[in-house]
Image: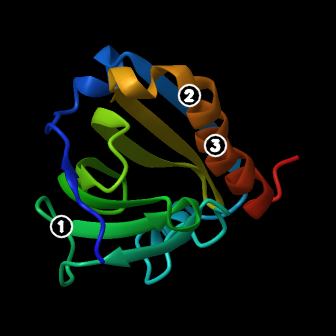
Amino acid sequence: MERPWFANQPVDASFFESAPVRMRARFEVARPAAEVWGELTGERPLYWCRILQEVKWTSPRPFEVGTTREVKALWGANSLREYYFRWEEGRQHSFYVVEATAPLASRFAEDYLVEPTGEGSCRFTWTIAFEPKALALPGLPVSKALLRTLYTDTRDHYDLR
């Protein structure tokens, strides 16, 4: 039996500064910006993140505003359908969750910004912003700890110790 889906509310870029919960990590990566961007938009984006079991594009290339993606996370505890509302090829993209199988947030979004800092290096800034539902508030410390593993795994992936 398929699990039910719970709708989330759309957001725009201002949500990354106004959301009740905001998390941000910056990674100084010793790889060209185009290579890091390529990993983030490749066939297996974020494969290094242990809480993400599958990240699958559901739109054809070339990607742009309106691109969609599905994610299976937390070993089946949550699946998400994402919609990209910002797409600046090679530099930045942002999505919000359209719906999820775990009713934990009323709004959830992520932003990925890749900026060159030299010929063979870049800065990758990953922002996560969300508004938890009331029923999820008691578990908020656990949710934040799980989300922080995305950053830890990314540091390990890029060998940033």
Disc 3, SS: helix
Residue 31 in the image, given as x and y percentages of width and height: 67, 63
Residue 3 in the image, given as x and y percentages of width and height: 30, 66
How many C-alpha atoms fall within 10 Å of the one at disc 2: few (<14), some, or many (≥20)? Answer: few
What's under tag 3, amino acid-wise?
Leu
State the CA–CA distance, disc 1 to disc 3.
26 Å
Residue 112 in the image, given as x and y percentages of width and height: 42, 48
Asked which quadrant contains residue 111, the reply is: top left
Disc 2, SS: helix
Q: Residue at x 40, y 67 (%)?
A: 71
Asked which quadrant contains residue 65, the reply is: bottom left
Q: Residue at x 37, y 15 (%)?
A: 20
Residue pointed to by mark 3 = 146
Residue pointed to by mark 2 = 139
Is residue 78 shown above or below 115? Answer: below
How many C-alpha atoms fall within 10 Å of the one at disc 1: few (<14), some, or many (≥20)? Answer: some
Q: How is the image coloured?
A: rainbow
Q: Is residue 55 left or right of residue 108?
A: right
Q: Earlier in the sequence, mark 1 or mark 3?
A: 1
Q: Earlier in the sequence, mark 2 or mark 1?
A: 1
How many C-alpha atoms fall within 10 Å of the one at disc 3: few (<14), some, or many (≥20)? Answer: some
Is residue 153 shown above or below 53? Answer: above
State the CA–CA distance, disc 2 to disc 3.
11 Å
What's under tag 1, amino acid-wise?
Thr
Of residues 107 and 42, the one nearer the viewer is 107
